[in-house]
Image (cartoon, rainbow, N blue to C red):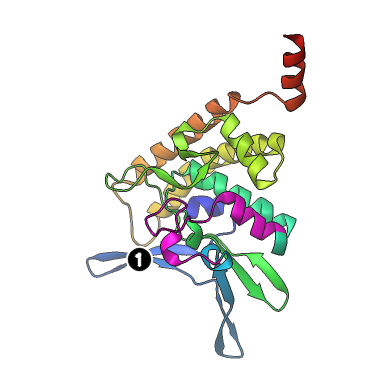
Amino acid sequence: MTLAGRCDLKTAAVTTGRAGEWSYLLVTRYDRVQREGRWLRVHQEDFCQALGKPPGAKYERNRSGVRGPRLADMFKVVEDYLTAVDRMRLLDAVISNVMICNTDSHAKNYSVLLTGRGASLAPLYDLMCAAEWENVTKNLSQTIAGKTRGDHLKGCHWQRMADECGLNRTMILRRIETIAGKVRRELPEAVEAVRAMPGGNHPLLTEFAAAIEARCRTIVLNLVHIEAAAEDADDNVHAR
């Protein structure tokens, strides 16, 4: 979450702390506001609620008997009810979650805030890196062009995701490169910022950083595997 915030993603405020021998994570609630000495609740709906899916279907592939939200479904909600800015924010969040090896970015970890002024994408929360946890799945919460593993994604898969979600193919590839570069630049400072928090260092922190660095390199290297434009494919057919 610290890394995401440094990469200009809107993220819930987070720090660590210690209580006796225990360390803890402290996340500030963004769905509460204080007015005239009273705490008020800001209504939010996660993407399972927004799409009428039960909590057990928060992963696209699950055992509830109900298919969970796909990325295309989530982008359709944003397209219908939110703004173009929110659509870019959702895209950046999806890309960033792949970059940080977050396999728990299920539909209940994306939310929409609802106020009298309208709807907007909520800050990101509950971000994690699954790469170094032995018993945590390495499969993505939502498939990208049918692919379940972030390290297997190629440029052509991102292009197909763009088609499915109503996004521009060229733009999404450029955005991936931009975010990968930003993540890699901010990673060392994010590590030091977490070490400086009251909870102190963690033995897996450097391993997480190395895994994220490796994922960013892999994703960018694989972007060269793209599909030809439709008109180019037609030209090749006619040439044959």
Q: Residues within 10 Å of mark 1 (few under 14, many from 20)?
A: some
Magenta stretch holds residue 53:
yes
* Span highlighted in magenta in the image: 52-79
User: Of all residues shown, which one is farthest toward the left?
Assistant: 21
Magenta stretch holds residue 123:
no
Q: Is residue 206 left or right of residue 178?
A: left
User: Of all residues shown, which one is farthest toward the top?
Assistant: 240
Seen from the viewer's position, the closer of residues 124 and 145 is 145
Does the rendering let one see residue 90?
yes
Residue 59 % position (x, y)? 44, 55
Does the rendering let one see residue 82?
no
* Location of residue 24 (image quadrant): bottom left
Residue 74 % position (x, y)? 60, 56
Residue 172 % position (x, y)? 66, 39
The correct choice, above or below, for 213 with respect to 56 in the image is: above
Q: Residue at x 71, y 61 (%)?
A: 80
Amino acid type, residue under disc 1 in the picture: Gly
Q: Is residue 52 left or right of residue 88?
A: left
Seen from the viewer's position, the closer of residues 236 and 165 is 236
Q: Is residue 221 left or right of residue 197?
A: right
The correct choice, above or below, for 231 with respect to 129 in the image is: above
Q: Residue at x 39, y 60 (%)?
A: 64
Q: Which residue is mark 1?
A: 17
Q: Is residue 84 left or right of residue 141?
A: right
